[in-house]
Image: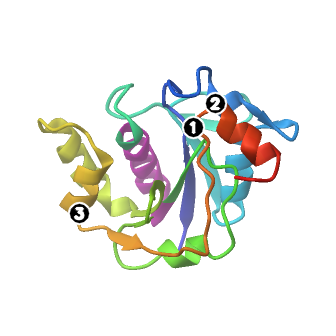
């Protein structure tokens, strides 16, 4: 199975107070940590929602400011056009991708890690379905999308993903207490 990795990085970082994708952790940006961690499980990594030097960037689809579904939609269309079977996603604020997470998510149909809806597995064939979903009048909630496609919710308490939403979350992670 050919897998594309997608780091969803088009958010506004309102709770963080500055661009959290570019916040530094151990000398590298959170986005670079997320891309490197995800890259161990996929053939190629793209960044959704922004352009960065040295990385393939995809504009949210069909327009900016659509939340994570705009980035996911861009990744699904890119995957389908490039011959990938599916997309593994992570958020730019998730600097690790634990061993075993990809295997837990990959299966029949879409899946997310419980409590971390940006850590997901998405068959590329869902691209046109997501186009239709985003064209409808809805709040563009990822939860509505998950319900629409009947995504699996994977429960794995042993797979801990830090989600850095505030500067104090980053400080806690740096001090070893995520």
- How far apart are labels 1 and 3 at the CA level? 27 Å
Q: Secondary structure at mark 3?
A: helix
In the image: residue 31, left or right of residue 69: right
Which numbered disc, 1 or 2, marks the residue closer to the eye?
A: 1
Residue 86 included in the magenta stretch of the image: yes
List x then y, in percent, for residue 52: 67, 28
Residue 91 seen: yes
The answer for how far apart the CA atoms under marks 1 and 2 are is 8 Å
Q: In this rendered view, identify the residue nearer to me: 153 or 65.
A: 153
* Residue segment shown in magenta: 70-87
Q: Which residue is mark 1?
A: 165
Mark 3 or mark 2: whose residue is earlier in sequence: 2
Tell me which numbered mark, 1 or 2, is placed earlier along the sequence: 2
- State whether residue 20 is above or below residue 106: above
**What residue is drawn where x is 81% and y is 44%?**
174
The residue at 45%/75% (across/down) is 155
Direction right: furthest residue: 27
Question: For residue 130: magenta?
Answer: no
Task: From the viewer's side, name the closer residue of 39 and 90.
Answer: 90
Please state the horizontal and vertical placement of residue 169, each as a whole percent of the image. Answer: 66, 40
- Toward the left, the furthest residue is 137
120 versus 22 height, above or below: below
Asked whether residue 84 is in view, the answer is: no
- Name the residue beneath numbered marker 2: 20
Q: Nearer the viewer, residue 27 or 62?
A: 27
Q: Position of residue 147 (x, y in %)?
A: 22, 60
Depth-wise, is mark 1 or mark 3 nearer the camera?
Answer: 1
Res. 149 mark: 3
Residue 135 - label: none
Q: Earlier in the sequence, mark 1 or mark 3?
A: 3
Query: Marks 1 and 2: CB-CB under 8 Å?
Result: yes
């Amino acid at each position: 199975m050919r897998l594309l990795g997608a780091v969803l990085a088009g958010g506004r970082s309102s709770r963080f107070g500055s661009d959290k994708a570019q916040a530094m952790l151990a000398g590298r940006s959170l986005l670079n940590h997320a891309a490197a961690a995800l890259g161990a499980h996929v053939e190629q990594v793209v960044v959704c929602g922004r352009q960065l030097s040295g990385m393939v960037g995809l504009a949210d689809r069909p327009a900016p400011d659509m939340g994570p579904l705009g980035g996911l939609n861009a990744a699904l269309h890119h995957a389908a056009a490039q011959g990938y079977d599916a997309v593994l996603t992570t958020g730019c604020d998730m600097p690790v991708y634990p061993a075993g997470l990809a295997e837990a998510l990959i299966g029949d149909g879409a899946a997310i890690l419980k409590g971390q809806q940006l850590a997901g597995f998405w068959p590329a064939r869902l691209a046109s379905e997501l186009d239709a979903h985003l064209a409808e009048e809805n709040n563009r909630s990822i939860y509505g999308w998950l319900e629409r496609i009947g995504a699996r919710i994977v429960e794995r308490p042993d797979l801990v993903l830090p989600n850095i939403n505030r500067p104090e979350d980053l400080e806690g992670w740096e001090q070893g207490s995520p």
